[in-house]
């Protein structure tokens, strides 16, 4: 039983490596190859959504890698390549979308949500303190006033 489990785990691990993306592109310079790998890691696969095109096995990711290679060979800059990809697939294709009118909500939402959470936390703490102060004495305001008067009278007579 144990040997079968180990064999199954080994087979599973070997199958994961077999599914890896293997492509060979020829580059003119090592810098061009480094740019290719950097851009492939920065561009999101439109089909897979949470994988970059370097890691995706989807046919569209393969097409994007080919297009990326062609544009690098043509001498396009990183910004030109990103602009091309955004024109075809929208800002979604970028893991770090540009700050602008279309992505304003995306960029500002975390700060707004954090601010709202801090306001709610502050309100909860204040209301809890007020509730604790009222619950400490267990007396109504009228009873507390009478107690304070009696204590003050006792202090004067002593």
Image (cartoon, rainbow, N blue to C red):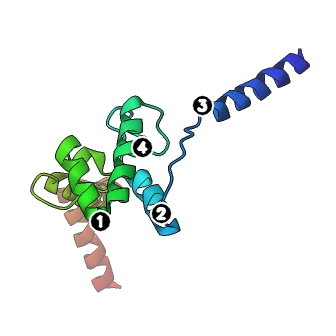
Q: Tell me which label, 1 or 4, sits earlier in the chain.
A: 4
> If you read the primary sequence from the N terminus, does the residue marked by circle 3 or circle 2 appear first?
3
Residue named by callout 3: 19
What is the C-alpha distance between the residues marked 1 and 2? 15 Å
Q: Position of residue 35 (x, y in %)?
A: 43, 62
Using the image, tell me which numbered label, if any, was put on residue 77: 1
Q: Position of residue 2 (x, y in %)?
A: 89, 20
Please report the residue visible at 83 percent of the width from the left and 22 percent of the height from the top. Answer: 7
For disc 4, the marked residue is 53
SS state under label 2 = loop
Q: In what element is the residue under mark 1?
A: loop
Determine whether the residue tagged by mark 3 lies in a helix, strand or loop: loop
Q: Is residue 117 visible?
A: no
Q: CA distance from mark 3 to mark 2?
A: 28 Å
Q: Are marks 3 and 4 in contact (CB under 8 Å)?
A: no
- Looking at the image, residue 70 sits to the left or right of residue 29; the answer is left
Residue receiving disc 2: 28
Question: Helix or strand or loop: what does disc 4 sit on?
Answer: loop
Judging depth in this view, the residue of 135 and 153 nearest the camera is 135
How far is the residue under mark 4 from the one under mark 2?
21 Å
Which mark's residue is nearer the viewer, 4 or 2?
2
Do residues under tags 3 and 2 come within 8 Å of each other at their CB atoms? no
* Nearer mark to the viewer, of 1 and 3: 1
Given residues 137 and 46, the one toward you in this image is 46
Within 10 Å of disc 2 (Cα), the crowding (few <14, some 14-19, many 20+) is: few
Left or right of residue 39: residue 90: left
| Mark sitting earlier along the chain (1/2) | 2
The foreground one among 72 and 55 is 72
What residue is at 45 percent from the left and 64 percent from the top?
Answer: 32
């Amino acid at each position: 039983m144990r040997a079968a489990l180990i064999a199954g785990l080994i087979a599973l691990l070997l199958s994961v490596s077999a599914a890896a993306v293997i492509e060979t592109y020829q580059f003119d310079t090592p810098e061009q190859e480094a740019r290719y790998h950097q851009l492939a890691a920065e561009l999101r696969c439109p089909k897979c959504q949470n994988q970059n095109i370097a890691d995706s096995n989807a046919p569209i990711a393969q097409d994007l890698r080919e297009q990326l290679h062609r544009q690098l060979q043509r001498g396009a800059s990183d910004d030109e390549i990103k602009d091309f990809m955004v024109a075809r697939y929208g800002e979604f294709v970028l893991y770090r979308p540009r700050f602008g009118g279309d992505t304003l909500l995306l960029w500002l939402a975390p700060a707004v949500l954090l601010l709202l959470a801090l306001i709610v936390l502050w309100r909860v703490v204040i209301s809890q303190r007020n509730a604790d102060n009222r619950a400490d004495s267990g007396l109504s305001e009228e009873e507390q006033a009478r107690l304070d008067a009696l204590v003050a009278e006792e202090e004067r007579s002593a």
